[in-house]
Amino acid sequence: MRRVHRELARSQVGPPVIIDCHGHYTTTPSAHLEFREAQLARLADPGLPEPSPAEIGDAQIRESIETNQLRLLRERGADVTLFSPRAAGMEHHVRDEATARAWATACNDLIHRVVGLFPEHFVGVCQLPQAPGVPIERSVEELERCVEDLGFVGCNLNPDPSGGHWTSPPLTDESWFPLYEKMVDLGVPAMIHTSASVNPSFHGTGAHYLNADTTIFMQLVEGDLFGRFPDLRLVIPHGGGAVPYHWGRYRGLAERLGRPPLHDHVMSNVFFDTCVYHQAGIDLLFDVVEVENILFGSEMVGAVRGIDPETGFHFDDTKRYVDALGLSPQDAHRIFEANARRVYPRLDAVLSGRGR
Ligand SMILES: [Zn+2]
Protein backbone atom coordinates (compact mmCIF):
# COMPACT_ATOMS: atom_id res chain seq x y z
CA MET A 1 0.00 0.00 0.00
CA ARG A 2 2.83 2.37 0.81
CA ARG A 3 4.30 1.73 -2.63
CA VAL A 4 0.94 2.56 -4.24
CA HIS A 5 0.78 5.86 -2.41
CA ARG A 6 4.28 6.80 -3.53
CA GLU A 7 3.37 6.08 -7.15
CA LEU A 8 0.21 8.13 -6.87
CA ALA A 9 2.16 11.02 -5.42
CA ARG A 10 4.58 10.87 -8.35
CA SER A 11 1.85 10.89 -10.97
CA GLN A 12 -0.26 13.68 -9.51
CA VAL A 13 0.54 17.36 -9.65
CA GLY A 14 -2.31 18.51 -7.42
CA PRO A 15 -5.36 16.89 -5.83
CA PRO A 16 -7.13 14.24 -7.96
CA VAL A 17 -9.22 15.54 -10.84
CA ILE A 18 -12.15 13.38 -11.91
CA ILE A 19 -12.50 13.76 -15.66
CA ASP A 20 -15.66 12.81 -17.54
CA CYS A 21 -14.46 12.31 -21.12
CA HIS A 22 -17.92 12.35 -22.68
CA GLY A 23 -20.43 15.19 -22.24
CA HIS A 24 -22.63 17.06 -24.71
CA TYR A 25 -24.33 20.45 -24.71
CA THR A 26 -27.82 18.98 -25.00
CA THR A 27 -29.41 21.89 -23.17
CA THR A 28 -28.59 24.81 -25.46
CA PRO A 29 -30.82 27.90 -25.31
CA SER A 30 -33.68 27.64 -27.79
CA ALA A 31 -32.36 30.47 -29.97
CA HIS A 32 -29.52 28.18 -31.08
CA LEU A 33 -32.00 25.58 -32.31
CA GLU A 34 -34.03 28.30 -34.00
CA PHE A 35 -30.92 29.20 -36.00
CA ARG A 36 -30.70 25.56 -37.07
CA GLU A 37 -34.36 25.55 -38.09
CA ALA A 38 -33.79 28.71 -40.13
CA GLN A 39 -30.81 27.04 -41.83
CA LEU A 40 -32.92 24.03 -42.80
CA ALA A 41 -35.80 26.25 -43.93
CA ARG A 42 -33.42 28.11 -46.23
CA LEU A 43 -32.17 24.85 -47.71
CA ALA A 44 -35.77 23.98 -48.53
CA ASP A 45 -36.45 27.47 -49.89
CA PRO A 46 -33.26 29.17 -51.18
CA GLY A 47 -35.24 32.39 -51.59
CA LEU A 48 -35.11 32.90 -47.82
CA PRO A 49 -32.35 35.11 -46.36
CA GLU A 50 -29.24 33.42 -44.97
CA PRO A 51 -29.71 33.18 -41.20
CA SER A 52 -27.11 34.34 -38.69
CA PRO A 53 -26.12 32.40 -35.57
CA ALA A 54 -28.26 33.26 -32.57
CA GLU A 55 -27.24 36.04 -30.25
CA ILE A 56 -27.24 34.40 -26.86
CA GLY A 57 -26.41 36.18 -23.61
CA ASP A 58 -24.00 34.85 -21.00
CA ALA A 59 -26.83 34.62 -18.48
CA GLN A 60 -28.75 32.22 -20.72
CA ILE A 61 -25.73 30.01 -21.20
CA ARG A 62 -24.95 30.06 -17.48
CA GLU A 63 -28.48 29.06 -16.61
CA SER A 64 -28.58 26.23 -19.16
CA ILE A 65 -25.37 24.75 -17.73
CA GLU A 66 -25.74 25.47 -14.02
CA THR A 67 -29.13 23.82 -13.79
CA ASN A 68 -28.11 20.77 -15.82
CA GLN A 69 -24.59 19.49 -16.56
CA LEU A 70 -22.81 21.44 -13.83
CA ARG A 71 -25.40 20.53 -11.20
CA LEU A 72 -25.09 16.85 -12.08
CA LEU A 73 -21.31 17.03 -12.26
CA ARG A 74 -21.25 18.38 -8.71
CA GLU A 75 -23.87 15.99 -7.39
CA ARG A 76 -22.07 12.98 -8.80
CA GLY A 77 -18.60 14.02 -7.73
CA ALA A 78 -16.78 14.73 -11.00
CA ASP A 79 -14.68 17.80 -11.71
CA VAL A 80 -14.12 18.32 -15.42
CA THR A 81 -16.13 17.32 -18.51
CA LEU A 82 -14.83 17.08 -22.05
CA PHE A 83 -17.69 18.96 -23.62
CA SER A 84 -18.89 18.79 -27.22
CA PRO A 85 -21.98 19.84 -29.16
CA ARG A 86 -25.07 17.62 -29.01
CA ALA A 87 -24.20 14.56 -31.09
CA ALA A 88 -27.63 13.89 -32.63
CA GLY A 89 -27.82 17.59 -33.46
CA MET A 90 -24.70 17.50 -35.67
CA GLU A 91 -26.99 16.23 -38.45
CA HIS A 92 -24.19 15.43 -40.84
CA HIS A 93 -26.71 13.79 -43.16
CA VAL A 94 -27.81 17.22 -44.41
CA ARG A 95 -26.28 17.43 -47.85
CA ASP A 96 -24.95 20.95 -47.97
CA GLU A 97 -21.38 21.73 -47.14
CA ALA A 98 -21.82 25.44 -46.47
CA THR A 99 -24.70 24.72 -44.10
CA ALA A 100 -22.66 22.05 -42.28
CA ARG A 101 -19.79 24.50 -41.92
CA ALA A 102 -21.92 27.35 -40.56
CA TRP A 103 -23.66 24.96 -38.16
CA ALA A 104 -20.45 23.37 -36.84
CA THR A 105 -18.94 26.83 -36.38
CA ALA A 106 -21.95 28.03 -34.39
CA CYS A 107 -22.05 24.86 -32.27
CA ASN A 108 -18.33 24.98 -31.53
CA ASP A 109 -18.43 28.69 -30.75
CA LEU A 110 -21.15 27.98 -28.21
CA ILE A 111 -19.00 25.28 -26.56
CA HIS A 112 -16.20 27.83 -26.41
CA ARG A 113 -18.55 30.23 -24.60
CA VAL A 114 -19.39 27.53 -22.05
CA VAL A 115 -15.70 26.80 -21.48
CA GLY A 116 -15.05 30.54 -21.08
CA LEU A 117 -17.78 30.85 -18.45
CA PHE A 118 -16.85 27.67 -16.56
CA PRO A 119 -13.14 27.08 -17.25
CA GLU A 120 -12.74 24.96 -14.13
CA HIS A 121 -15.32 22.43 -15.26
CA PHE A 122 -15.50 22.24 -19.05
CA VAL A 123 -12.91 21.68 -21.78
CA GLY A 124 -13.94 21.79 -25.43
CA VAL A 125 -14.20 18.97 -27.97
CA CYS A 126 -15.38 19.96 -31.44
CA GLN A 127 -17.96 18.98 -34.00
CA LEU A 128 -16.60 18.61 -37.54
CA PRO A 129 -18.47 20.10 -40.52
CA GLN A 130 -18.97 16.73 -42.18
CA ALA A 131 -21.57 16.03 -44.88
CA PRO A 132 -22.20 13.03 -47.14
CA GLY A 133 -19.79 12.93 -50.06
CA VAL A 134 -17.74 15.90 -48.83
CA PRO A 135 -14.06 14.94 -48.47
CA ILE A 136 -12.85 14.87 -44.87
CA GLU A 137 -10.03 17.32 -45.66
CA ARG A 138 -12.76 19.96 -45.75
CA SER A 139 -13.11 19.42 -41.97
CA VAL A 140 -9.44 19.99 -41.23
CA GLU A 141 -9.70 23.78 -41.09
CA GLU A 142 -12.42 23.72 -38.43
CA LEU A 143 -10.44 21.21 -36.36
CA GLU A 144 -7.44 23.50 -36.55
CA ARG A 145 -9.51 26.57 -35.59
CA CYS A 146 -11.04 24.81 -32.61
CA VAL A 147 -7.75 23.42 -31.31
CA GLU A 148 -5.42 26.30 -32.02
CA ASP A 149 -7.73 29.31 -31.62
CA LEU A 150 -10.34 28.03 -29.16
CA GLY A 151 -8.19 25.68 -27.06
CA PHE A 152 -10.18 22.51 -27.72
CA VAL A 153 -8.51 19.19 -26.95
CA GLY A 154 -10.21 16.71 -29.31
CA CYS A 155 -12.91 16.16 -31.89
CA ASN A 156 -15.89 13.94 -32.56
CA LEU A 157 -15.49 12.03 -35.82
CA ASN A 158 -18.59 10.67 -37.54
CA PRO A 159 -17.75 7.51 -39.52
CA ASP A 160 -21.17 7.62 -41.20
CA PRO A 161 -22.25 11.13 -42.21
CA SER A 162 -25.15 9.59 -44.17
CA GLY A 163 -26.97 8.98 -40.87
CA GLY A 164 -27.41 5.22 -40.98
CA HIS A 165 -26.90 4.28 -44.62
CA TRP A 166 -23.11 3.78 -44.37
CA THR A 167 -22.13 5.30 -47.69
CA SER A 168 -18.59 6.27 -46.62
CA PRO A 169 -15.54 4.03 -46.93
CA PRO A 170 -14.22 2.40 -43.74
CA LEU A 171 -12.20 4.60 -41.39
CA THR A 172 -9.11 2.67 -42.46
CA ASP A 173 -9.48 3.99 -46.03
CA GLU A 174 -6.91 6.54 -47.11
CA SER A 175 -9.62 9.09 -47.91
CA TRP A 176 -9.78 9.72 -44.14
CA PHE A 177 -6.02 10.18 -43.79
CA PRO A 178 -5.91 13.99 -44.17
CA LEU A 179 -7.86 14.31 -40.92
CA TYR A 180 -5.65 11.79 -39.11
CA GLU A 181 -2.53 13.62 -40.28
CA LYS A 182 -3.86 16.85 -38.79
CA MET A 183 -4.97 15.12 -35.58
CA VAL A 184 -1.51 13.64 -35.08
CA ASP A 185 0.03 16.97 -35.93
CA LEU A 186 -2.10 18.78 -33.35
CA GLY A 187 -1.85 15.96 -30.80
CA VAL A 188 -5.61 15.47 -30.46
CA PRO A 189 -7.65 12.25 -30.41
CA ALA A 190 -11.10 11.70 -31.91
CA MET A 191 -14.08 10.15 -30.26
CA ILE A 192 -15.93 8.06 -32.84
CA HIS A 193 -19.44 9.46 -32.72
CA THR A 194 -22.28 9.15 -35.18
CA SER A 195 -25.10 11.65 -35.30
CA ALA A 196 -28.84 11.30 -35.88
CA SER A 197 -30.09 8.24 -37.75
CA VAL A 198 -32.24 8.94 -40.79
CA ASN A 199 -32.68 5.21 -41.38
CA PRO A 200 -35.86 4.14 -39.57
CA SER A 201 -34.40 0.67 -39.04
CA PHE A 202 -31.80 2.12 -36.67
CA HIS A 203 -32.88 3.98 -33.57
CA GLY A 204 -30.37 6.81 -33.10
CA THR A 205 -29.06 6.26 -29.60
CA GLY A 206 -30.29 2.68 -29.13
CA ALA A 207 -28.95 1.17 -32.34
CA HIS A 208 -27.06 3.58 -34.62
CA TYR A 209 -24.54 4.77 -32.00
CA LEU A 210 -23.81 1.25 -30.76
CA ASN A 211 -23.67 -0.16 -34.29
CA ALA A 212 -21.03 2.42 -35.15
CA ASP A 213 -18.94 1.65 -32.07
CA THR A 214 -18.96 -2.04 -32.93
CA THR A 215 -18.49 -1.52 -36.67
CA ILE A 216 -15.49 0.76 -36.31
CA PHE A 217 -13.72 -1.63 -33.98
CA MET A 218 -14.02 -4.37 -36.60
CA GLN A 219 -12.76 -1.99 -39.31
CA LEU A 220 -9.69 -1.39 -37.16
CA VAL A 221 -9.18 -5.14 -36.70
CA GLU A 222 -9.42 -5.71 -40.47
CA GLY A 223 -7.13 -2.85 -41.44
CA ASP A 224 -3.77 -1.62 -40.24
CA LEU A 225 -4.53 2.00 -39.46
CA PHE A 226 -2.17 2.23 -36.50
CA GLY A 227 0.67 0.73 -38.52
CA ARG A 228 0.29 3.81 -40.71
CA PHE A 229 -0.51 6.22 -37.83
CA PRO A 230 1.15 4.91 -34.67
CA ASP A 231 0.35 8.12 -32.77
CA LEU A 232 -3.34 8.27 -33.71
CA ARG A 233 -5.72 7.76 -30.80
CA LEU A 234 -9.43 6.94 -31.07
CA VAL A 235 -11.98 6.74 -28.28
CA ILE A 236 -14.86 4.37 -28.94
CA PRO A 237 -17.69 5.48 -26.68
CA HIS A 238 -20.60 3.67 -25.05
CA GLY A 239 -18.27 1.08 -23.56
CA GLY A 240 -17.11 0.03 -27.03
CA GLY A 241 -20.59 -0.97 -28.22
CA ALA A 242 -20.88 -4.76 -28.42
CA VAL A 243 -17.11 -5.28 -28.53
CA PRO A 244 -16.32 -6.23 -24.92
CA TYR A 245 -19.21 -8.72 -24.84
CA HIS A 246 -17.89 -10.38 -28.02
CA TRP A 247 -14.19 -10.04 -27.27
CA GLY A 248 -13.52 -13.69 -28.10
CA ARG A 249 -15.05 -13.21 -31.54
CA TYR A 250 -12.72 -10.30 -32.31
CA ARG A 251 -9.68 -12.18 -31.02
CA GLY A 252 -10.65 -15.16 -33.14
CA LEU A 253 -11.31 -13.02 -36.21
CA ALA A 254 -7.97 -11.23 -35.83
CA GLU A 255 -6.26 -14.60 -35.86
CA ARG A 256 -8.29 -15.86 -38.81
CA LEU A 257 -7.56 -12.70 -40.80
CA GLY A 258 -3.85 -13.02 -40.13
CA ARG A 259 -3.78 -9.94 -37.93
CA PRO A 260 -1.59 -9.57 -34.83
CA PRO A 261 -3.23 -10.04 -31.42
CA LEU A 262 -5.65 -7.22 -30.58
CA HIS A 263 -3.43 -5.94 -27.81
CA ASP A 264 -0.66 -5.08 -30.29
CA HIS A 265 -2.80 -4.40 -33.34
CA VAL A 266 -5.51 -2.09 -31.98
CA MET A 267 -5.45 -1.59 -28.24
CA SER A 268 -2.38 0.66 -28.05
CA ASN A 269 -4.46 3.31 -29.84
CA VAL A 270 -8.10 2.61 -28.95
CA PHE A 271 -9.90 3.48 -25.73
CA PHE A 272 -13.41 2.75 -24.49
CA ASP A 273 -15.43 4.93 -22.13
CA THR A 274 -17.70 3.87 -19.28
CA CYS A 275 -21.00 5.01 -20.83
CA VAL A 276 -22.65 1.71 -20.00
CA TYR A 277 -25.75 2.16 -17.94
CA HIS A 278 -25.86 -0.80 -15.60
CA GLN A 279 -23.50 -2.50 -13.16
CA ALA A 280 -23.27 -5.85 -14.94
CA GLY A 281 -22.18 -4.09 -18.14
CA ILE A 282 -19.44 -2.17 -16.33
CA ASP A 283 -18.33 -5.36 -14.57
CA LEU A 284 -18.00 -7.06 -17.96
CA LEU A 285 -16.13 -4.11 -19.48
CA PHE A 286 -13.56 -4.18 -16.70
CA ASP A 287 -13.30 -7.98 -16.78
CA VAL A 288 -12.44 -7.93 -20.48
CA VAL A 289 -10.67 -4.67 -21.28
CA GLU A 290 -7.38 -3.52 -19.71
CA VAL A 291 -7.63 -0.66 -17.25
CA GLU A 292 -5.22 1.35 -19.44
CA ASN A 293 -7.85 1.37 -22.20
CA ILE A 294 -10.85 2.66 -20.22
CA LEU A 295 -11.75 6.29 -19.62
CA PHE A 296 -14.44 7.45 -17.24
CA GLY A 297 -17.39 8.94 -19.13
CA SER A 298 -21.10 9.40 -18.56
CA GLU A 299 -22.48 11.11 -21.69
CA MET A 300 -24.68 13.31 -19.62
CA VAL A 301 -27.02 14.95 -20.11
CA GLY A 302 -27.71 12.42 -22.81
CA ALA A 303 -29.94 9.75 -24.18
CA VAL A 304 -30.75 7.78 -21.04
CA ARG A 305 -31.30 10.42 -18.40
CA GLY A 306 -34.03 8.77 -16.34
CA ILE A 307 -33.90 7.01 -12.98
CA ASP A 308 -33.43 3.25 -12.95
CA PRO A 309 -36.35 1.90 -10.92
CA GLU A 310 -34.22 -1.09 -9.92
CA THR A 311 -31.54 1.01 -8.25
CA GLY A 312 -33.25 4.35 -7.60
CA PHE A 313 -30.30 6.15 -9.26
CA HIS A 314 -29.93 7.73 -12.67
CA PHE A 315 -28.95 5.28 -15.41
CA ASP A 316 -26.21 7.66 -16.58
CA ASP A 317 -24.68 8.15 -13.13
CA THR A 318 -21.83 5.93 -14.29
CA LYS A 319 -19.39 6.93 -11.56
CA ARG A 320 -21.50 4.93 -9.15
CA TYR A 321 -20.88 1.72 -11.12
CA VAL A 322 -17.14 2.35 -11.40
CA ASP A 323 -16.93 3.13 -7.68
CA ALA A 324 -18.71 -0.16 -6.95
CA LEU A 325 -15.94 -2.11 -8.70
CA GLY A 326 -13.67 -1.58 -5.72
CA LEU A 327 -10.68 -0.68 -7.89
CA SER A 328 -7.24 -0.20 -6.33
CA PRO A 329 -6.35 3.48 -5.80
CA GLN A 330 -3.92 3.19 -8.70
CA ASP A 331 -6.52 1.82 -11.10
CA ALA A 332 -9.15 4.31 -9.99
CA HIS A 333 -6.65 7.10 -10.65
CA ARG A 334 -6.09 5.73 -14.16
CA ILE A 335 -9.79 5.46 -14.98
CA PHE A 336 -10.82 8.83 -13.56
CA GLU A 337 -7.82 10.94 -14.49
CA ALA A 338 -4.52 9.56 -15.74
CA ASN A 339 -5.82 7.77 -18.85
CA ALA A 340 -7.72 10.86 -20.00
CA ARG A 341 -4.64 13.04 -19.50
CA ARG A 342 -2.60 10.56 -21.54
CA VAL A 343 -5.12 10.22 -24.38
CA TYR A 344 -5.82 13.98 -24.47
CA PRO A 345 -2.39 15.57 -23.94
CA ARG A 346 -3.82 19.04 -24.55
CA LEU A 347 -6.22 18.46 -21.66
CA ASP A 348 -3.24 17.51 -19.52
CA ALA A 349 -1.57 20.77 -20.53
CA VAL A 350 -4.71 22.79 -19.66
CA LEU A 351 -4.97 21.16 -16.24
CA SER A 352 -1.25 21.34 -15.52
CA GLY A 353 -1.31 25.01 -16.46
CA ARG A 354 -3.79 25.51 -13.64
CA GLY A 355 -1.73 23.51 -11.15
CA ARG A 356 -4.07 20.54 -11.30
ZN1 LIG B 1 -22.11 11.06 -26.98
Image (cartoon, rainbow, N blue to C red):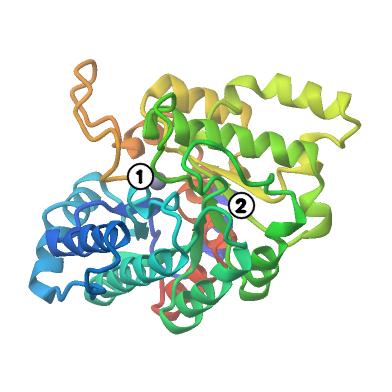
* Residue 124 falls in image quadrant: bottom left
**Above or below — where is 199 with respect to 28?**
above
Quadrant for the N terminus, please.
top right
Left or right: residue 229 versus residue 80 is: right
Q: Residue at x 59, y 27 (%)?
A: 244
Q: Quadrant of residue 55?
A: bottom left
Please name whichever residue, 231 or 352, is drawn nearer the observer in this view of the structure.
231
Tell me the quarter of the picture where residue 47 sits: bottom left
Residue sitting at x 39%, y 27%: 200
According to the image, label 2 marks what residue? Answer: 234
Question: Depth check: 72 or 59 in front?
Answer: 59
Pointers 2 and 1 in contact (CB under 8 A)?
no
Location of residue 205 in the rendering, given as x and y in whole percent from the top left corner: 38, 34
Q: Residues within 10 Å of mark 1 (few under 14, many from 20)?
A: many
Amino acid type indicated by mark 1: Glu
Residue that sits furthest to the bottom in the current view: 149
The reply, left or right, for residue 312 in relation to residue 249 is left
User: Does residue 351 lie above or below 156 as drawn?
Assistant: below
Which labelled disc corresponds to residue 299?
1
Residue at point 53%, 23% (across, down): 284
Q: Earlier in the sequence, mark 2 or mark 1?
A: 2
Q: Amino acid at mark 2?
A: Leu
Please name whichever residue, 186 or 321, is drawn nearer the observer in this view of the structure.
186
Extreme residue in the right direction = 258
| Percent coordinates x, y for residue 355 in the rendering | 41, 77
Q: Is residue 286 visible?
A: yes
User: Of helix, strand and loop, which one carries label 1?
Assistant: loop
- State the image coordinates of residue 18 (x, y, percent, origin top left): 38, 54
Farthest residue, direction front: 47
Q: Is mark 1 within 8 Å of ligand 1?
A: yes
